[in-house]
């Protein structure tokens, strides 16, 4: 179905931070499959793990015991707030599981009327009927009604407005601590701590969607660690498989109390092949220098962008985000500039809401890639202006 307005770049091969298309043209990849290829393209450890597991055992279904799944789940539990994990094949499925877990918690508590999740303007949680019901963006919802009841939206970063929506039907809050598609908008500490406090006071659940901002992307394993809060339930995906389709819903055992045998499932979710990919990514990320490297590269990229902005202040407005999830806000349409970067300067980025150019490179970039990226951005800004002045 022609649901994507695809561009002319047709990659056939990847190597580290670079993609090569059919004609052999090389692109600097600061899109990373939309914040997915955390280890870049063709990382030897990931490639080897997938190849070996494919030859050993690819899939058996969740009807059987799974040493591979138990091992990876235990590692995620050990490295996070969570006590329990459900594996999915995508971000939207991880959010679906999170929504079901939240509803089912209140059901198990004898309060099934508490089924409404408060979500936020500009949110993006995926494209299933459940996850589009959780956003209020018309471009995702129009024509797909009737949607799922049980969601109400407040403005992002407006704690008072969110709290004003809480009533006897509220199950909790579902929030991206940094909105990705919405424009790399960072949730303020006051806002996120306020939601956590409200949950603690009123027995509500804090459900974080860290599908994009989690898994090393911002220099800590999960972004909420930097904020100093913990969720009750969290959706993870994108970077977790390094390009292999994988997602996970993590929860405390308290929040997951309703998720008993038979309440949820997935044919593929957590199969041995996916677990091998997940473990290979985690092995690399767990190396002592990995997350500090992300933090250092994030600071460096941000610094370089901030230095560049005044030279092109007719076009660039500000830098937002954290770690290697950065947004360059433009004073004009970002989609057009993203196309210009791609077609004229062989730099791949992703457009986001609020005229933001998203920079979400592989987490393994080094200084040379940052220098190359900023050179390309500056060169693009110079001619872009010349072109639009004509
Ligand atoms: C990408 C994304 C999703 C959806 O993930 P899919 O794998 O496309 O289903 C959900 N939430 C956030 C915050 C995302 O960035």
Image (cartoon, grey):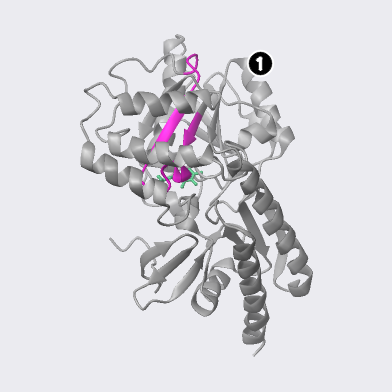
Left or right: 300 in relation to 134: right
Location of residue 221 in the rendering, given as x and y in whole percent from the top left corner:
57, 36
Q: Say above or below: 357 vs 49.
A: below
Quarter holding the C terminus is bottom right
Quarter holding the N terminus is bottom left
Q: Mark 1 points at which residue?
A: 201
Q: Say above or below: 336 vs 158.
A: below
Location of residue 39 in the rendering, given as x and y in whole percent from the top left corner:
48, 50
Q: Residue at x 51, y 23 (%)?
A: 78
Magenta span includes 264: no
Location of residue 343 in the rendering, given as x and y in whole percent from the top left corner:
49, 77
Magenta span includes 251: yes
Q: Nearer the viewer, residue 10 or 147?
A: 10
Is residue 327 visible to us here? yes
Q: Which residue is drawn at 40% across and 56% down?
A: 42
- Image-quarter location of ligand 1: top left
Left or right: 311 in relation to 36: right
Is residue 146 visible to us here? no
Q: Nearer the viewer, residue 58 or 180?
A: 58
Location of residue 164 in the rendering, given as x and y in whole percent from the top left corner:
66, 29
Q: Say above or below: 301 vs 144.
A: below
Q: Residue at x 31, y 20 (%)?
A: 263
- Magenta residues? 234-255
Circle count: 1
Element under disc 1 = helix
């Amino acid at each position: 179905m022609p649901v994507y307005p695809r561009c002319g770049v047709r990659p056939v091969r990847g190597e580290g931070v670079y993609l090569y298309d059919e004609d052999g043209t090389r692109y600097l990849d600061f899109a990373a499959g939309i914040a997915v290829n955390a280890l870049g393209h063709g990382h030897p450890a990931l490639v080897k793990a997938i190849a070996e597991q494919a030859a050993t055992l690819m899939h058996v279904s969740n009807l059987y015991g799974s040493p591979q799944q138990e091992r990876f789940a235990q590692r995620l539990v050990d490295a996070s707030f969570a006590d329990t994990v459900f594996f999915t094949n995508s971000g939207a499925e991880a959010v679906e599981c999170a929504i079901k877990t939240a509803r089912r918690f209140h059901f198990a508590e004898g309060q099934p009327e508490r089924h409404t999740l408060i979500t936020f303007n500009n949110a993006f949680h995926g494209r299933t009927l459940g996850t589009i019901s959780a956003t209020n963006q018309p471009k995702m919802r129009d024509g797909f009604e009737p949607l799922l009841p049980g969601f109400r939206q407040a403005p992002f970063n407006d704690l008072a407005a969110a709290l004003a929506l809480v009533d006897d039907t509220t199950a909790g809050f579902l929030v991206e601590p940094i909105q990705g598609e919405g424009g790399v908008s960072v949730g303020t500490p006051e806002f996120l701590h306020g939601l956590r406090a409200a949950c603690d006071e009123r027995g509500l659940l804090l459900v974080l969607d860290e599908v994009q901002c989690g898994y090393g992307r911002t220099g800590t394993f999960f972004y909420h660690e930097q904020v100093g809060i913990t969720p009750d339930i969290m959706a993870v995906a994108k970077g977790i498989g390094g390009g292999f389709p994988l997602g996970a819903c993590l929860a405390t055992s308290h929040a997951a109390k309703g998720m008993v045998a038979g309440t949820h499932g997935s044919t593929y979710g957590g199969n041995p092949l996916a677990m091998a990919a997940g473990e290979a990514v985690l092995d690399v990320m767990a190396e002592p220098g990995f997350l500090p490297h992300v933090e250092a590269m994030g600071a460096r990229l941000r610094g370089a962008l901030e230095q560049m902005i005044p030279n092109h202040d007719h076009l660039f407005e500000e830098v937002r985000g954290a770690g290697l999830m950065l947004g360059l806000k433009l004073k004009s349409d970002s989609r057009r500039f993203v196309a210009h970067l791609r077609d004229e300067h062989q730099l791949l980025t992703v457009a986001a809401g609020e005229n933001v150019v998203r920079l979400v490179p592989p987490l393994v970039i080094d200084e040379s890639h940052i220098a190359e990226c900023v050179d390309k951005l500056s060169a693009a800004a110079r001619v872009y202006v010349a072109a639009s002045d004509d």
